[in-house]
Image (cartoon, helix red, strand yellow):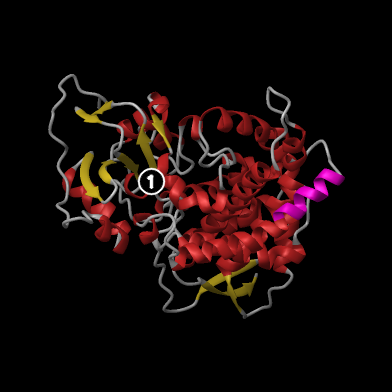
Amino acid sequence: MSSESSTVTDEHPPGPDGLPLVGNQLAFLRHPYEFMTETAREYGDIAYWEDPTGPVYQLNHPDYIEQVLVQNNQHYVKGDRFQNVLGPATGNGILNSEGAVWRRNRHLIQPAFRPDRIEEYASMMTEFTEEKLETWNEGETRPFHEDMMEVTLKIVARALFGVDIDDDVETVGSALDEFMLATESLSHMMLPSQVPTPSRRRIQRARESLDAVVYRMIEERRANPTDRDVISKLLEVTDEDGTKLSDEQIRDEVVTLLLAGHETTALSLTFTAYLLATNPAAEERLVDELDDVLGGDTPTMADLDDLTYTEQVVEESMRLYPPVPGIVREPAKPDIIGGYEIEPGATVRMHQWVVHRDPRWYDDPLAFRPARWTDDLKQSLPKLAYFPFAAGPRRCIGDRFAMLEARLLLATIYQNYHLELVPGTELDLMATITARPKDEIPMTVRER
């Protein structure tokens, strides 16, 4: 399928009718996953709808998504909509900065995610996981998502910043939770910035408590720099005129990495545990592989090549429940997609949630079937029929880190414990930047 058409129409694509003034905003906010899925199924590969900020183009075909994220990425920016949601938390960090600032800071942070550095993180990943498992008791019910958030937060703080935040885990975790929960209520985006909505007040309180910890981390690294952690690297850099980064600029990058570095992996593990608990045959096959390969030993980097099914479990979990369910871009220049002209001022939405569940690319798409992830499937898929970490220049900088972490933590947990989903638990998701469970996912732990 060609991502462009030689015939350009002045009309907009088909799409759902909206209400006066609010367009389709309320329908999207009330039932986001249903809305995006039904829109794709009813209106095809490119759909049009409106909200109070203007026209929205929903792209549902991998070729169109590749055009935006890869081929014509220079025509698109994260834009004001993304900044309004995440900016109050992350400031101008690499998730939402643009241009020269983004290129400079990504270059500074990139060494922390080189393959040789990532290999060094493997042992601390299993160490923190085993430390958490030591607090589990046979037959007790654990708040599994909360446990995973704690473990992954400790890992990212130690790996990227060289600090232990044991005493600050509750403060940092609660503040990051508040940021994400506040984005569920997006009504404040429709109001002037000076209007003190409840969600804006929550964000401000969370920022104040988080900043107290982060600025202390910066001061500690300024007094005791290393040649390996991200904060020390950011403290060293100077602009062309010799100006160093301000503490606020460094703070933005630290908060961005803390948030992105633990949130998505914790979610991926939570969804994986839920899927395994509801698919006992898949769990049995996973445990058989762990027994055969590890024999009760702590998993290491060297074991991963032999943990084929473990990797397939993670890939399939991120297909069905992508931790980031959608991506938003705004055109900085006009573009033509599917024969339609996309003008600046519009919003372009691309949803992993929709594409990953499209029956054109996946047989029985709503079924949890890790074994589907063969080399033949990967070679047959359109390039962006699977994009849990986005794509192009703005692809997640920590994708290898996240995949390593997910596999090692999964292997460490499941060779020690069987997890039983508490009867009656439903996986109902919120509409935040990530796909968060509305309620805790309680698991009863059974020693193996």
Task: Identify the amino acid type marked 1.
Answer: Gln
Relative to residue 368, is residue 131 depicted above or below? Answer: below
Of the pair 148 and 201, the residue shown nearer to us: 201
Q: Is residue 31 magenta?
A: no
Q: Residue furthest front?
A: 194
Q: Residue furthest right?
A: 224
Residue 220 lies in magenta, yes or no? yes
> Viewer-proximal residue, 424 or 322?
322
Residue at left 72%, top 64%? 168
Q: Main secondary structure of the magenta part?
A: helix
Which quadrant is the N terminus positioned in? top left
361 relative position to 368: left or right:
left
Looking at the picture, how far across and down is residue 17, in whole percent? 14, 52
Task: Place residue 414 in its image quadrant.
Answer: bottom right
Is residue 335 rendered to the left or right of residue 312? left
Residue 355: % across, % down: 33, 44
Q: Which residues are magenta?
A: 214-223
